[in-house]
Amino acid sequence: MHDVIVIGGSYAGLSAALQLARARRRVAIVDSGLRRNRFASHSHGFLTQDGVAPDVIATTARDQVLAYPTVTWHAGEATDARADGGGFVVTLGGGTSVAGSRLILAIGVRDELPAIDGLAERWGRSVFHCPYCHGYEVDGPIGVLAASPMSIHHAQMLPDWGPTTYFLNGGPAPTDAELADLARRGTAVEPAPIRRLVGARADIELADGRIVPVSGLFTATRMSPSSPLAETLGCALATTPTGSHIETDPMKQTTVPGVFACGDAARPFGSVALAVGDGAMTGASVHRSLLFPGP
């Protein structure tokens, strides 16, 4: 019997596990190996790791956490999770299971990308979602693809990183107030539909045949937890303009007692730095819940 089971061995899950390992708690980490930023070649904005490859950060973190003797690693997908006798049982893909007193969902999110030819192949390389993570490295004209209510916010922000064009892709025009603000920021607006992305970067071929060169394209994806386990357990989800995430209180506990959540799956926005901080908070909160279980 473990003290805590962590589902998800990426940045948030490992950060939570580290706090618990240092409290000498028995921790089982279950991980399927599908980090959200696995498509990106470099990670940015995280102190001491700026510009480091994401897999290097993740591998180093895993090695450091597994150096603690109370931590075990289970490679594979968690296919089921249920409450059992005051604790939880997690079933793995091979049919084996692990049991623990507390459960942390660090399951990450699934990004639903706009259905434009050539976009998915460039995701994480020249098509991005976060200006703070990737904007500095985009050297030249920037495109913003209208794909959600958050897209106008991208179009207003990104001129700080370079000359910006907001591609409506045939969608509704911004309001007069939004157009005035885009003009103030120097953002051009292109209403024509997009046919596809072309070239080595993310150049945009419009339906009328014009090609608009851009060094990088930013778009807001629609996010949802990458696993149905939160709903299986009965955890409430919160809906935002960016999609859905697991609802938690300030101590990172979900609406199900004993189940905590952290990282991108429990936030409307994410980055490596935010995931690590969120995980650290969650690990400390779970440890506190073991010390003071309440009534």
Image (cartoon, helix red, strand yellow):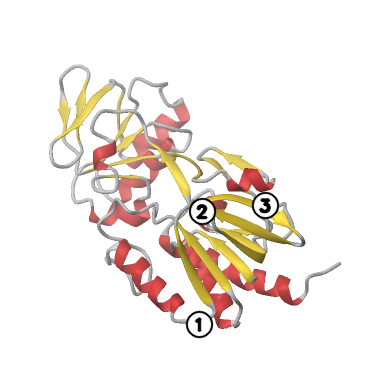
Q: Which residue is mark 2?
A: 107
Front-lying residue, 77 or 169: 77
Residue sitting at the far right: 295
Residue sitting at the far front: 95
Q: Which residue is mark 3?
A: 82
Q: Nearer the viewer, mark 1 or mark 2?
A: 1
CA–CA distance between discs 1 and 3? 26 Å
Q: Is residue 56 left or right of residue 11?
A: left
Q: Is residue 41 left or right of residue 98?
A: left
Q: Amino acid at mark 2?
A: Ile
Q: Which residue is mark 1?
A: 69
Q: Kindly state the secondary structure of the residue where label 2 is placed.
A: loop
- Quadrant for the C terminus, please: bottom right
Q: Is residue 155 left or right of residue 83?
A: left
- Coordinates of residue 239 in the picture (x, y in percent): 60, 39
Front-lying residue, 54 or 96: 96
Q: Kindly state the secondary structure of the residue where label 1 is placed.
A: loop
Q: Residue at x 37, y 50 (%)?
A: 130
